[in-house]
């Protein structure tokens, strides 16, 4: 039974669409908010998204199935905010306020995209 569930998780096509949309949105976000630091922002965002992918996949599946509320999903995603390092932006000397704005915008992008795709 467990392997069947894992198989469904691997074939979770909606999640692939979600990841693609978040990646596209991240590029726009970095371009529009951190023009001079776009490459660093994209690299840092990629590290965060990769490290959060398994949790996001599991939570997104539950959201899609109606087993997780939008409020719970949002809370779970926002709980990841504190682990977002954005080290390359820090190393590049970007002000903490600008890094926090980008981090908040990235979290909102993930949540809004999930709601568009899964709800």
Image (tube, rainbow, N blue to C red):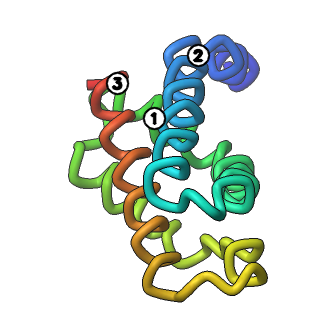
| Residue 12 badge | 2
Relative to 5, does residue 23 appear above or below in the rendering?
A: below
Quadrant where the N terminus sits is top right
> Residue shown at 69%/82% (left/top)?
90
Q: Position of residue 72 (x, y in %)?
A: 29, 54
> Residue shown at 49%/40% (left/top)?
28
Q: Position of residue 19 (x, y in %)?
A: 58, 30
Which of 86 and 115 lies nearest the eye of the viewer? 86
The residue pinned by badge 3 equals 118
Q: Secondary structure at mark 3?
A: helix
Which of 115 and 44 lies nearest the eye of the viewer? 44
The extreme front residue here reads 36
Looking at marks 2 and 3 on the same chain, the residue that comes earlier in the sequence is marked by: 2
Which of 84 and 89 lies nearest the eye of the viewer? 89
The residue pinned by badge 1 equals 60
Asked whether the residues under the numbered discs 2 and 1 touch, taking CB atoms below 8 Å apart as contact, a structural biologist would say yes
Looking at marks 3 and 1 on the same chain, the residue that comes earlier in the sequence is marked by: 1
| Residue 96 badge | none
Asked whether the residues under the numbered discs 3 and 1 touch, taking CB atoms below 8 Å apart as contact, a structural biologist would say yes
- The quadrant holding residue 9 is top right
Q: Residues within 10 Å of mark 1 (few under 14, many from 20)?
A: many
């Amino acid at each position: 039974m467990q392997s069947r569930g894992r198989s469904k998780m691997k074939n979770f096509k909606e999640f692939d669409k979600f990841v693609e949309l978040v990646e596209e949105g991240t590029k726009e976000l970095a371009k529009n908010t951190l023009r001079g630091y776009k490459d660093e922002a994209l690299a840092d965002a990629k590290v965060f998204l990769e490290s959060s992918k398994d949790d996001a996949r599991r939570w997104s599946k539950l959201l899609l199935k109606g087993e997780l509320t939008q409020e719970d999903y949002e809370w779970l995603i926002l709980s990841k905010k504190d682990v977002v390092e954005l080290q390359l932006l820090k190393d590049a000397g970007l002000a903490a306020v600008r890094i926090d704005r980008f981090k908040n915008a990235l979290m909102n992008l993930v949540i809004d995209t999930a709601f568009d795709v899964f709800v």
